[in-house]
Amino acid sequence: MSATEPQAGSPALATMLFEAMKRLGSSVLPFVVVILIWQFASLFFPRFLFPSLIDVFWRCLEIFSSGAMFADVLSTILRILAGLAGAFLIGGLLALLMVRSRAVDEFLAPVLGGVRHHLVSWR
């Protein structure tokens, strides 16, 4: 086989590479278009509406390096976990009361409505 003769797998490899590049381009192109439109808009609108991408980059760098964002994210996560714990506790207590008392079950049944039809009856 000579060096100038094409190899058997070359067209398939070229097609695969072309398809991969095409998929990558169709995934990235919308982001590039939005970035270009944003940057163009930053030239004509006030900074509070469309700051330049350079300003956004430096502000993000400042936020991530200061540690202030970490405290805010941690605070938000703790609030979410506290809300979930409260919901589980109250929901568990109400379920226990409903199983133990027919009066409580009949009182809360209209509130639970459609949800109750999907649950398995314990009686």
Image (tube, grey):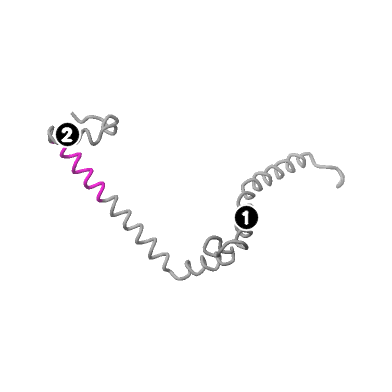
The magenta region covers 86-100
Task: Please state which amino acid type lies under the numbered disc 1.
Answer: Ile
Left or right of 93, for residue 115: right
Q: Which mark is residue 37?
A: 1
Q: Name the residue under label 2.
A: 105
Q: As drawn, is 60 to the left or to the right of 16?
A: left
Say whether residue 68 is magenta.
no
The image shows residue 75, relative to residue 89, as above or below, that is below
Label 1: few (<14), some or many (≥20) within 10 Å? few
* Distance from the alpha carbon under mark 2 to that under mark 1: 58 Å
Q: x%, y% of residue 110?
A: 22, 33
| Mark 1 element type | helix
Query: Pointer 2: residues within 10 angstroms few (<14), some, or many (20+)?
Result: some
Where does the image place residue 84, in percent across and percent down from the top left? 29, 50
In reply to whether residue 95 is colored magenta, the answer given is yes
Q: Which image quarter holds the C terminus?
A: top left
**Which badge, 2 or 1, is on the more N-terminal residue?**
1
> x and y percent of residue 91 in the render?
23, 43
Residue visible at 75% across and 40% down?
Answer: 9
> Is the residue 116 above or below the residue 60 in the image?
above
Residue 104 spot, x, y in % from top left: 14, 36
